[in-house]
Image (cartoon, grey):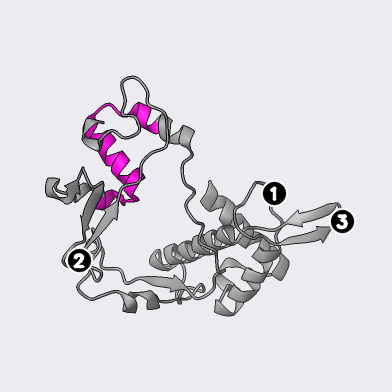
Amino acid sequence: MSYAYDLRHLWRFFGERGLTWDAFAPPHAIPLLEYLRSVPSRRPRQRMTLTAVTAAADGPATKLAATTVNRILAAVSSFYEYAILAGLLDRTNPIEKRPDPALQRVFERHRPFMGRASRQRPVRRAVRVKTVQALPRPLDDAQVEALLAELRSKRDRALVLLMLQGGLRPGEALGLHLEDIAYGRRRVVVRHRDDHPKGGAVEVPLRARRRPARAGGPGHGQRLRDG
């Protein structure tokens, strides 16, 4: 449904400009972007990023978010990719793509998990809206307690507490060995992969959890292995 909804914006743009889908060309990409940036949002909601607000006849109007505009452009690009593969269009995609320059900054020995599963080259659309990367929001105490209450094994509880108290990523917690954990010193040695550009080891302190003790669970000051 979202794909059809995104393409509806494209056809409305065609109606305003007097275009047809097969006449849409790269020079029309910028006007399409300007059109999308002027479309009011019909679904008001709380956003954590900056949005464009303009004065309308019936009050302030919130425009489409940058992420929504980029999603619409991606849908338009996919539509024309299908048209080209199906033989309905005999020219290049009007939403031009360029090689992603971020690939040049990746260490040649580093290959992420499943990085060799696809032969596609990383690309990005030439026409897009810059977005602000949203920072992750930490869990509050009530959410942490609810998460721990759902865990049924000591192994899972230990992994979650390691990530909570030491700020470990899931991959770092799963890669730990018994000798990497110093219970008495409340220290954990995180060892990175040998083929990673930032390989090596770092010692991470475990901070104490500030919560009252409860029956059936570890309280403040208890060792992690007892949880």
**Circle nearer the N terminus (3, 2):** 3
Q: In the picture, residue 184 is in which quadrant?
A: top left
Using the image as rendered, state which of residue 52 and residue 6 is in the foreground.
52
**Circle nearer the N terminus (3, 1):** 1
Q: What range is drawn magenta here? A: 147-172
Q: Is residue 109 above or below residue 46?
A: below
The residues tagged by marks 3 and 2 sit, at their Cα atoms, a distance apart of: 60 Å
Which class describes the residues within 10 Å of circle 2: few (<14), some (14-19), or many (20+)? few
Point out which mark residue 57 bears.
Answer: 3
Q: Amino acid at mark 3?
A: Ala
Which class describes the residues within 10 Å of circle 1: few (<14), some (14-19), or many (20+)? few
Query: Can you say which quadrant of the picture contains the C terminus?
Result: top left
Question: What residue is shown with label 2?
Answer: 200
The residues tagged by marks 1 and 2 sit, at their Cα atoms, a distance apart of: 50 Å
Residue at x 70% of width, y 64% of height: 15
SS type, badge 2 = loop
User: Nearer the observer, disc 3 or disc 2?
Assistant: 2
Point out which mark residue 42 bears.
Answer: 1
Question: Residue 179: x percent and y percent?
Answer: 12, 49
Which class describes the residues within 10 Å of circle 3: few (<14), some (14-19), or many (20+)? few
167 in the magenta segment: yes
Q: Residue furthest right?
A: 57
Question: Residue 62: x percent and y percent?
Answer: 72, 55
The residues tagged by marks 3 and 1 sit, at their Cα atoms, a distance apart of: 15 Å
